[in-house]
Amino acid sequence: MFRRSFLTAATALTVGFVTAQARAAVVEQPFTQAAFDSAKASGKPILVAIHAPWCPVCAKQKPILGALEQDPAFAALTVFAVDYDNQKDIVAALGANKQSTLIAFHGTAERARSVGMTDAAEIKALVGKALS
């Protein structure tokens, strides 16, 4: 009887932990103007990441951003990925000149912007500005 109760409790804890981790994960989504406008209008914290598949700086940013997207502290963050090569109109509308540009918004207000940043602590601080 004790063994069955223990296994039931362990299973419940595991399921609860996995569910909590799933909720903590931020889902990066392709940029669309409609989704971006909706997120801004609802006052959400937003990160726009302008990347190119051939960019070595972007490749360095990707695991750092991936780790932040798994961090429960950033669970409310909405991340939009802009393809530098194929979304030139969006790149221009956002006032970006280069790939590896990160732009943090809180609702409609731009809070921070960087180009070419690869230091994990600096990226975390930039993304954190979207939360406040």
Image (cartoon, rainbow, N blue to C red):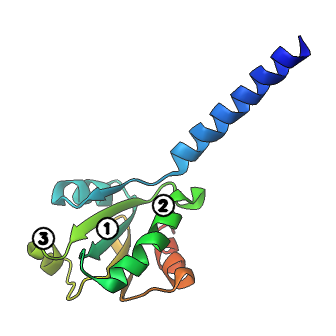
Question: Distance of mark 2 from mark 1, alpha carbons?
Answer: 21 Å
Q: Position of residue 127 (x, y in %)?
A: 47, 73
Residue furthest out toward the right = 2
Q: Mark 2 Cα within 10 Å, few/some/many (few <14, many 20+)? A: many
Relative height, residue 107 to residue 129 (above, below): above
Mark 3 or mark 1, earlier in chain: 3
Q: Mark 3 Cα within 10 Å, few/some/many (few <14, many 20+)? A: few
Relative height, residue 20 to residue 88 (above, below): above
- Residue at image coords 10%, 76%: 88
Q: Is residue 43 left or right of residue 3?
A: left
Report helix, strand or loop for mark 3. loop
Q: Position of residue 58 (x, y in %)?
A: 34, 79
- Residue at image coords 31%, 82%: 100
- Residue at image coords 58%, 56%: 72
The kind of residue tagged 2 is: Glu
**Tag count in the figure?**
3
Disc number lying in front (2 or 1): 2
Residue at numbered disc 1: 108
Q: Is residue 41 left or right of residue 34?
A: right
Choose between 20 and 127: the one closer to the eye.
20
Mark 2 or mark 1, earlier in chain: 2
Residue at numbered disc 2: 69
Question: Distance of mark 2 from mark 3, alpha carbons?
Answer: 23 Å
- Residue at image coords 46%, 65%: 66
The image quarter containing residue 103 is bottom left
Choose between 56 and 84: the one closer to the eye.
56
Q: Position of residue 31 (x, y in %)?
A: 22, 61
Quarter of the image where the N terminus is located = top right
The image quarter containing residue 3 is top right
Mark 2 or mark 3, earlier in chain: 2
Residue at numbered disc 3: 87
Q: Position of residue 84 (x, y in %)?
A: 18, 76
